[in-house]
Amino acid sequence: VTIAITNEKRALERIAKRVWRGLQKKHKHASELHASNESPSLRKRMLRFVARVDDLEIMYARIDKRRIPPEWHSQKHKIYNHVVGFLLRSYFENTTTSRGVVGIVVDRRDIKKSLQEEFLTYLRGVGVPATFPREFSITLQSSHENKSLQVVDFIAWALFRKHEMGESEYSDIFQEKVSFEQVCTIQTTKKEK
């Protein structure tokens, strides 16, 4: 799971639009960009734009699949909730900058409609420190609605390739923007089983 943090709400959206403008007409039939479907040159172009965003901060967490409790193997939504919650807690606990209202946008595609409310309820209760002085909002949008999610898809894809395939040529492009990376473990309580 990857999060991209910036003070400029539209910075990532402008990257997606800029990359779209550079595409040939034959490629524009699709409604959105997905890293796994694009050419190496387009991926690198997108990620070079990412690396140029001045105040961009990238945080990500991955999970050691071998250490997932057996009772969670069939509950991927709980694993996803846990990892996103872990990242948000890490952000709230480690941020020292004043960013005003924190707007959190999550790709709706990753969450089944029937589990969306459970996901939002879980995130609102992840343990935001009482000393955290800012408001935050969580919204679910599709990557078609919010182009910045398409850019984060490219970042997440590059990090996946780095860790799953040992291929870091893409993630090396923006590595200096990564402020937090962690392997997340799942420890269940009796209530969660």
Image (cartoon, grey):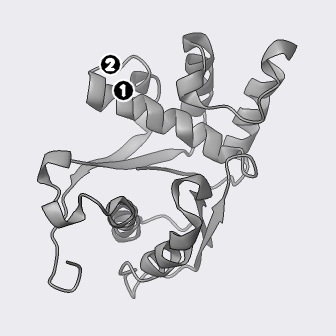
For mark 1, give the secondary structure. helix
Left/right of residue 13 with respect to residue 189 in the rendered view: right
Residue at point 48%, 47% (across, down): 57
The dot on residue 161 is: 1
Residue at point 67%, 31% (across, down): 33
Left/right of residue 27 with respect to residue 99 in the rendered view: right
Q: Position of residue 64 (x, y in %)?
A: 19, 47
The dot on residue 170 is: none
Q: Badge 2: how crowded within 10 Å, few (<14), some, or many (20+)?
A: some
Tag 2: amino acid: Glu
Q: Is residue 15 above or below residue 40?
A: below
Q: Residues under labels 1 and 2: Cα distance? A: 5 Å
Q: Position of residue 39 (x, y in %)?
A: 59, 14
Q: Position of residue 41 (x, y in %)?
A: 59, 11
Residue at point 15%, 69% (across, down): 187
Tag 1: amino acid: Arg
Whether residue 54 is visible here, answered yes or no, is no
For mark 2, give the secondary structure. loop
**First in sequence: mark 1 vs mark 2:** 1
